[in-house]
Amino acid sequence: MKASSYLTSAALLLITALLLSGCQKPSPVRDWRYTRWGMSASEVTAASKGAAVPANPSDQPHERSRDNQVLLKAPVGWEGLNFTAYYAFDPRTRLLSSITLELQNATASANEALLELLNRQYGRPYSGHEDPSTKILVWQSGRDQVGFVKLSDPKLAVGAPATSVSYQSLGASP
């Protein structure tokens, strides 16, 4: 009887631990590892230990806000997904003001994994739109806005990432 009771308690403890581990937030993604809002391009490059390299003019369409200038890009990873990060700077101040992550190999399963991570990290989006060719979701995290964009129609995705996540400061200044 005692052994049975002990096994039942141990089984319940194990099940509880497994359930709680599945509910944990993924590792933090604030400011993409080594950046903070308001950094200069040279500060981002230095903080990235050389991973952030100058962007090409053809990288500008990857900036979702359309107000900033993409000056740097770097490979980044989050929970097994690979992205190219595009670091955009305010054209007036030349300081970091947004980051857009383009999901590499944006398969249906990678898109679903990314959405699951975003929902675990930020909760339910406060805004969204979905039609057969486009899915847009928006979260607020502190003073940052996080946007998910998935373009299913190849005509819409010309020159732009098919799946991306954009981070932008909502503060008065970066």
Image (cartoon, rainbow, N blue to C red):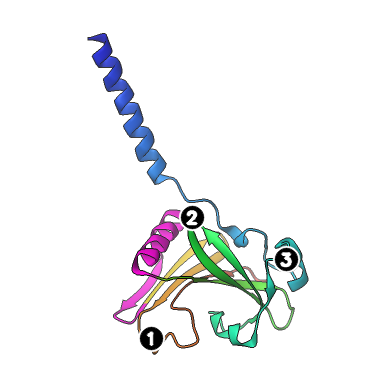
Give the image quarter of residue 44: bottom right
In x, y percent, where is residue 117?
43, 57
Split into 4 quadrants, where in the image is the N terminus? top left
User: In the image, what residue occupies the spot 40% across and 63% down?
Assistant: 115
- Whichever of callouts 2 and 3 sits on the residue coming sooner in the sequence is 3
Decide: is 30 above or below 148.
Answer: above
What kind of element bears circle 1?
loop
For mark 3, does the 10 Å Cα neighbourhood hold few (<14), some (14 to 19), or many (20 or more) residues?
A: few
The residue that label 3 is drawn on is 50
Classify 10 Å Cα crowding around label 1: few (below 14), some (14-19), many (20 and above): few
The residue segment tinted magenta is 107-134
Q: Find the residue positioned furthest to the top.
A: 2
Query: Residue at label 2?
Result: 79
**How many numbered marks are there?**
3
Query: Which residue has dot 1 on it?
Result: 154
In the picture, measured across the screen, residue 15 lies left or right of residue 29, that is left
Judge by depth and name the residue closer to the eye, 122 or 104: 104
Assess whether residue 125 is covered by the magenta stretch: yes
Q: Looking at this view, is 162 or 142 the one in front?
A: 162
Q: Residue placed farthest to the left in the image? A: 1
